[in-house]
Amino acid sequence: MGEHVARFVLGGFFVATFAVLGDLFKPKSFAGVFAAAPSVALATLALTVGLTGAGYAAHEARSMIVGALAFVAYASAVASILHRRGGRPRLVAALCAVVWIACAAVGWVLWLRPA
Amino acid sequence: VKLRFDPGPLRQTRWHGHLLRFVAGGAVTVATGLIAERWGPVVGGLFLAFPSIFPVSVTLLEKLQNREVGAGARGDRARRAAIAEAAGASTGGVGLIAFAMVAWLGLPHLPASLALGAAALAWAAAGFGTWAVRRVLAIR
């Protein structure tokens, strides 16, 4: 239970802090870089090292490379769809999670899946 | 538009917007930990870069932009802001790749604080560097 509380507080702190930093700059495209800050990763990896060791955390970081590639595809898809087809930003941002899942699945099959 | 420090939007964001991002961030971090517990670090690690906070940020951005336009807002300004935010996030995603690579290579050999500090610096360098390169290429 204590571990989950620590994850919640640390993750919330990093996410809120990077979001505030993003609010401080213009243009919006620069501020958008903060929308891809490694907030959840920093909180998770820091706690994982303490709880289960650096080797376990390194495994997570290796998988994160695939997740991050999928994130680039996701954010590009959101920008492209809003630009070309319009739509409500919140809806497009939510639906494009499918792009992330598809890219992450391909990356898992190609690189991460145990032999 | 020149890069500049502008605390205006921060003042316009209501306190529950910050609270929402804190709660969402905390919840996602707990969920990521639970996924790693259930399915192991290989699957759990994927979700360290899951776009869970981005839709929340876009929702808050959309509301703020529509509020600024006032009654009768058609959403055009919100859409333009969301496109810029998403384009920025895609360059930040390049930073996430750099973060993950440095953490992967550094964690087994360096003290955790040093490895994660170096990874955060790699995120900033790659993310903002990519943003700057894209900007120069777009101007030309």
Image (cartoon, coloured by chain):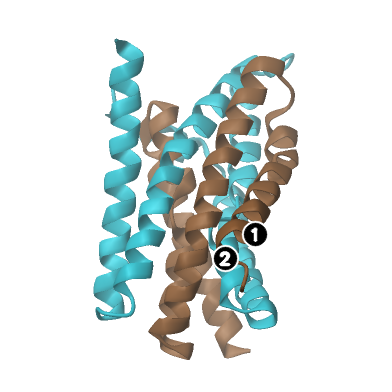
Please state the horizontal and vertical placement of residue B109, each as a whole percent of the image.
26, 79
Let me know if residue B77 appears in the view.
yes
CA gap between label 2 and label 1 equals 6 Å
Name the residue type under label 1. Answer: Val
Mark 1 chain: A
Residue at 55% across, 46% down: A71
Q: Which chain is cyan?
A: B
Q: Which residue is mark 1?
A: A109
Q: Which chain is brown?
A: A
User: Residue A112's mark?
Assistant: 2
Please state the horizontal and vertical placement of residue B26, each as a whole percent of the image.
58, 67
Is residue B99 positioned above or below A55 on the image? Answer: above
Please state the horizontal and vertical placement of residue B39, each as a whole percent of the image.
68, 77
Mark 2 chain: A
Q: Are marks 2 and 1 on the same chain?
A: yes
Can you tell which quarter of the image residue B25 is in? bottom right
Residue at 70% across, 48% down: A102
